[in-house]
Amino acid sequence: LFGLPEQPAHERVLLAADPATGLKAIVALHSTARGPAFGGCRLWHYDSDAAALNDALRLSQGMSLKNALADLPFGGGKAVILKPPGAFDRPALFAAFGRAVQSLGGAYITAEDVGTTTADMRGLQAVTPFVSGIPRDGAFGGDPSPKTAWGVFVAIQAGARLVLGRTSLEGVRVALQGLGAVGWHLAEFLHAAGAKLVVADVDAAKVERAVAQFGAVAVGVADILAAEVDVLAPCALGASLNEQTVPTLRAKLIAGAANNQLATPADGDALQRRGICYLPDYLVNAGGIISVAREYRGEGEEAAVMAEVSRIAERVEELLLRVQAADSTPARVADDWARSKLVHQP
Ligand code: NAI
């Protein structure tokens, strides 16, 4: 666990178990150098405890890099709740999870992630103040996914301009893997900008809606990554860019919401060798954490948050300049850039 090359040491990992509710959760605090560790809570079925731990460690490290590149005064953390087998009392499960978050005394702040909702966050609020992503009366707050989607959208715009030489997204072909909370909003933004969508989701109803609403072309989940498109936007789960898939890709630009898209750093190198520009997930998908961080600090306001999220486009530009100067890959340059910011804030 301590400092493997691919998985640098984490500051703290909490294993929380509550037999009464069936809670089994892992809260990983990767770094609190910049401030309290901030990152969402995932509710997921894992094949093993080891797989859940691995997910928590990888995701929390990604949050450190994401929060640092977004210049947020927060470190990186993430929680995973192992989905109990069979029926369970959801409010009771989240109350138990909230007590675990509370036990960390503010070193970790949680929010939504895959499998958790604004209602779950509202439930947590009764147990702990260290939670965000909650609709608030008369104040900014709530579901971060539209902000995440906006950040991915402006990154695609910037990438299309700088990598593909396209000044507009009119007619640009984009493959969307996953039409969930983020993927759907992204599809709306892309469609409004004139992009041509190719979509896949394991949920056939979402695909049907996208075909009807956006004139999207539907392909199978096994075919979406290799679709004949200009841009690939992975918006499902992690590790979609791996040894098997990278040789099959036809897009020239990759920018999507999913966390941990690269299975290994070597897959980023392989993309570069194939002439494919990969915009690192944690740079591109920071819109959601920017939103919940603003909300948590009580300084949110819709227009200001959107403006801050739009700055992701500037970071894409700066990243591509740094890549040229360093003669390296976007993934490696972004990692070095983010790690240089993992320092204690005054
Ligand atoms: P979601 O659970 O609402 O959507 C995921 C979608 O992907 C679902 O529609 C699901 O059916 C689909 N899917 C699952 N496996 C698939 C496959 N093999 N092929 C095609 N579709 C598949 O999750 P959400 O919130 O949209 O997040 C998507 C990704 O973005 C996740 O990796 C999440 O960690 C990441 N992310 C989300 C943020 C947010 O604000 N919600 C913020 C930053 C990252």
Image (cartoon, rainbow, N blue to C red):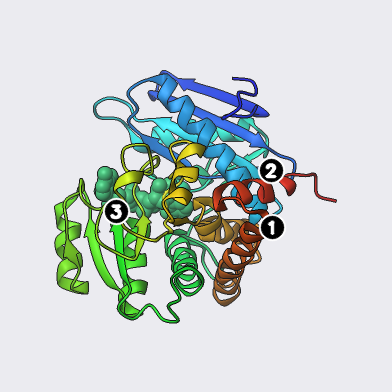
Which numbered disc, 2 or 1, marks the residue closer to the eye? 1
Residue 108: which quarter of the image? top right
Q: Is residue 213 above or below residue 56?
A: below
Q: Is residue 216 above or below residue 58?
A: below
- Determine if residue 260 is in view: no
In three-dimensional space, the C-alpha distance between marks 1 and 3, rounded to whole angstroms, equals 28 Å
In three-dimensional space, the C-alpha distance between marks 2 and 1, rounded to whole angstroms, equals 14 Å
Task: Pick whichever, 340 or 293, lies toward us.
Answer: 340
Residue that carries the numbered disc 1 in the rendered image: 71
**Label 3 CB, ligand 1: below 8 Å?**
yes
Task: Pick whichever, 282 or 113, lies toward us.
Answer: 282
Residue that carries the numbered disc 2 in the rendered image: 36
Residue that carries the numbered disc 3 in the rendered image: 178
Image-based side of 9 in relation to 189, left or right: right
Image quadrant in which the N terminus is located:
top right
Measured as percent of width and height from the top left, residue 196 is found at 26, 73
Hey, what amino acid is under mark 1? Asp
Residue under the point 34% across and 48% down: 236
Q: Secondary structure at mark 2?
A: loop
Local packing at callout 1 (Cα closer than 10 Å; few below 14, some 14-19, many 20+) is: some
